[in-house]
Amino acid sequence: MYAWLFCFVGSIFTAKDIAALPQPDQQMWVALVTWSPTLPALCAALAFLGALVLRLGLRWAALVASNAFLWSALALVFLWIPKAP
């Protein structure tokens, strides 16, 4: 949960920084960065639905969804880690 909140706040500041500097496809990058925190929630929802389709039961579906949310949020953190130019 904390990783997702970190990504949410980071995306706001990163989108503002991208919008301040002229670059190719700037509007697309601002939109992608702004909406990137929805990726963990989308992954969790898809994992939950996939587990229900496989008829694993609600407990397993919830476990699969929480794991998908955790790992996709942690993967998203690497987007916000500063990188050397």
Image (tube, rainbow, N blue to C red):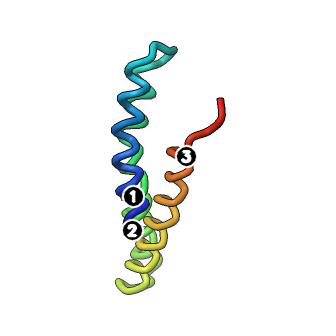
| CB under 8 Å between discs 2 and 1 | no
Q: Which mark is residue 49?
A: 2
Instruction: State the residue lying farthest toward the right.
Output: 84
Vertical comparison of 36 with 32: above or below:
below
**Residue on which the image places disc 1:** 4
Vertical comparison of 47 with 38: above or below:
below
Give the amino acid at mark 3.
Answer: Ile
Of tags 3 and 2, which is closer to the observer? 3
Indicate which disc, 3 or 1, sits on the residue closer to the N terminus. 1
At a point 51% along the width and 60% down the height, the residue shown is 74
Dot 3 alpha-carbon crowd within 10 angstroms: few under 14, some 14 to 19, many 20 or more: few
Dot 1 alpha-carbon crowd within 10 angstroms: few under 14, some 14 to 19, many 20 or more: many
At a point 43% along the width and 80% down the height, the residue shown is 63
x%, y% of residue 28? 42, 25
Q: Marks 3 and 2, how far apart in space?
A: 31 Å
Quarter placement of the N terminus: bottom left
Count of residue discs: 3
At a point 43% along the width and 65% down the height, the residue shown is 69
Q: Marks 3 and 1, how far apart in space?
A: 13 Å
**Residue on which the image places disc 3:** 81
Q: Marks 2 and 1, how far apart in space?
A: 21 Å
Indicate which disc, 3 or 2, sits on the residue closer to the N terminus. 2
x%, y% of residue 60? 43, 84
Quarter placement of the C terminus: top right
Give the amino acid at mark 2.
Answer: Leu
At a point 46% along the width and 75% down the height, the residue shown is 64
Vertical comparison of 14 with 44: above or below:
above
Give the amino acid at mark 1.
Answer: Trp
Q: Secondary structure at mark 2?
A: helix
Q: Which mark is residue 76?
A: none
Q: Secondary structure at mark 3?
A: loop
